[in-house]
Image (cartoon, rainbow, N blue to C red):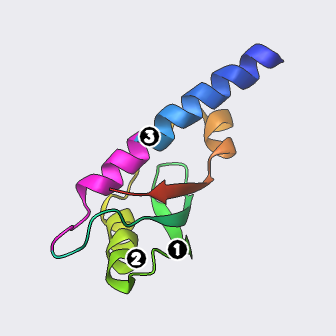
Amino acid sequence: RLEELEYDQSEISKFVNLIIKAIESKFDETNLKEGLSCKILIRMSEDGTVLESNIVESSGNELFDQRADKAVHSASPLPVPSEIRLFNKMRTIRITFEP
Protein backbone atom coordinates (compact mmCIF):
# COMPACT_ATOMS: atom_id res chain seq x y z
CA ARG A 1 0.00 0.00 0.00
CA LEU A 2 1.24 3.41 -0.99
CA GLU A 3 0.31 5.17 2.29
CA GLU A 4 2.23 2.58 4.27
CA LEU A 5 5.28 2.93 2.02
CA GLU A 6 5.20 6.71 2.32
CA TYR A 7 4.79 6.47 6.09
CA ASP A 8 7.71 4.04 6.32
CA GLN A 9 9.95 6.26 4.18
CA SER A 10 9.18 9.34 6.25
CA GLU A 11 9.72 7.48 9.56
CA ILE A 12 12.95 5.91 8.33
CA SER A 13 14.36 9.22 7.13
CA LYS A 14 13.41 10.76 10.50
CA PHE A 15 15.40 8.05 12.30
CA VAL A 16 18.32 8.28 9.89
CA ASN A 17 18.55 12.02 10.66
CA LEU A 18 18.46 11.29 14.40
CA ILE A 19 21.22 8.71 13.91
CA ILE A 20 23.39 11.19 12.00
CA LYS A 21 22.88 13.81 14.76
CA ALA A 22 23.83 11.24 17.41
CA ILE A 23 27.02 10.37 15.53
CA GLU A 24 27.89 14.04 14.95
CA SER A 25 27.56 14.71 18.68
CA LYS A 26 30.31 12.12 19.34
CA PHE A 27 32.57 13.26 16.50
CA ASP A 28 35.89 14.92 17.30
CA GLU A 29 36.56 17.69 14.76
CA THR A 30 39.85 18.82 16.32
CA ASN A 31 42.50 19.69 13.71
CA LEU A 32 40.45 18.49 10.75
CA LYS A 33 39.88 20.61 7.70
CA GLU A 34 36.35 21.67 6.81
CA GLY A 35 34.18 20.08 4.19
CA LEU A 36 35.21 16.44 4.50
CA SER A 37 32.64 13.69 4.11
CA CYS A 38 32.54 9.92 3.92
CA LYS A 39 29.91 7.26 3.40
CA ILE A 40 29.41 4.75 6.21
CA LEU A 41 27.50 1.49 6.17
CA ILE A 42 26.06 0.73 9.61
CA ARG A 43 24.47 -2.53 10.74
CA MET A 44 22.46 -2.46 13.97
CA SER A 45 20.59 -4.81 16.26
CA GLU A 46 16.95 -4.21 17.27
CA ASP A 47 17.94 -2.03 20.22
CA GLY A 48 20.13 0.24 18.09
CA THR A 49 23.43 -1.32 19.14
CA VAL A 50 26.00 -0.92 16.38
CA LEU A 51 27.08 -4.39 15.25
CA GLU A 52 29.27 -3.22 12.42
CA SER A 53 30.29 -0.04 10.68
CA ASN A 54 32.33 0.24 7.50
CA ILE A 55 33.58 3.25 5.62
CA VAL A 56 32.34 2.45 2.11
CA GLU A 57 33.54 5.68 0.56
CA SER A 58 36.54 7.37 2.12
CA SER A 59 36.86 11.11 2.64
CA GLY A 60 40.47 10.75 1.50
CA ASN A 61 41.53 11.76 5.02
CA GLU A 62 42.42 8.76 7.16
CA LEU A 63 42.03 10.59 10.47
CA PHE A 64 38.57 11.86 9.51
CA ASP A 65 37.46 8.35 8.49
CA GLN A 66 38.83 6.79 11.69
CA ARG A 67 37.11 9.40 13.86
CA ALA A 68 33.84 9.02 11.95
CA ASP A 69 33.95 5.25 12.52
CA LYS A 70 34.81 5.78 16.19
CA ALA A 71 31.91 8.24 16.55
CA VAL A 72 29.48 5.64 15.18
CA HIS A 73 30.54 3.20 17.89
CA SER A 74 30.56 5.89 20.61
CA ALA A 75 27.00 6.88 19.73
CA SER A 76 25.78 3.28 20.09
CA PRO A 77 23.01 2.40 20.82
CA LEU A 78 21.60 4.54 18.03
CA PRO A 79 18.01 5.79 17.94
CA VAL A 80 15.87 3.24 16.08
CA PRO A 81 12.12 2.74 15.70
CA SER A 82 10.54 0.42 18.27
CA GLU A 83 8.26 -0.94 15.55
CA ILE A 84 10.10 -4.05 14.37
CA ARG A 85 8.59 -3.92 10.87
CA LEU A 86 10.11 -0.48 10.39
CA PHE A 87 13.38 -1.42 12.03
CA ASN A 88 13.80 -4.36 9.67
CA LYS A 89 13.79 -1.92 6.76
CA MET A 90 16.69 0.01 8.28
CA ARG A 91 18.68 -2.69 10.06
CA THR A 92 21.50 -1.76 7.69
CA ILE A 93 21.77 1.86 6.61
CA ARG A 94 24.19 3.81 4.52
CA ILE A 95 24.76 7.38 5.58
CA THR A 96 26.76 10.25 4.22
CA PHE A 97 28.65 11.74 7.14
CA GLU A 98 29.54 15.39 6.62
CA PRO A 99 29.64 17.18 9.98
> How far across and how far down the image is residue 12, in percent?
57, 35
Disc 3 packing (10 Å; few <14; some 14–19; many ≥20):
some
Mark 1 and mark 2 in contact? Answer it, CB < 8 Å: yes
- Crowdedness near tag 2: few (<14), some (14–19) or many (≥20) residues, C-alpha within 10 Å: many
Sequence-earlier tag: 2 or 3: 3
Q: How many C-alpha atoms fall within 10 Å of the one at disc 1: few (<14), some, or many (≥20)?
A: some
Asked if marks 2 and 3 touch (Cβ < 8 Å), the reply is no
Residue 84 falls in which quadrant of the image? Answer: top right
For this view, does 66 lie left or right of residue 94?
Answer: left
Q: Is residue 82 visible?
A: no
Q: Would you say residue 27 sits in the magenta stretch? A: yes
Image quadrant where one finds the C terminus: bottom left
Disc 2 to disc 3, how far (Cα)? 19 Å
Amino acid type at image mark 1 = Ile
Q: At x 41% / y 50%, what residue is drawn?
A: 78
Residue located beneath label 3 in the image = 17
* Amino acid type, callout 2: Asp
Residue 86 location (% of width, % of height): 64, 35
Q: Which residue is mark 1?
A: 55
Membership of 9 in magenta stretch:
no
Q: Considering the numbered disc 1 on the image, is that residue within a helix, a strand or a loop?
A: strand
Q: Which residue does the image show at 39% across and 64% down from the upper left?
A: 72
Which residue in the protein does label 2 denote? 65
Magenta region: which residues?
A: 18-30
Q: Position of residue 79 (x, y in %)?
A: 41, 43
> Relative to the observer, which residue lies in front, 13 or 89?
13
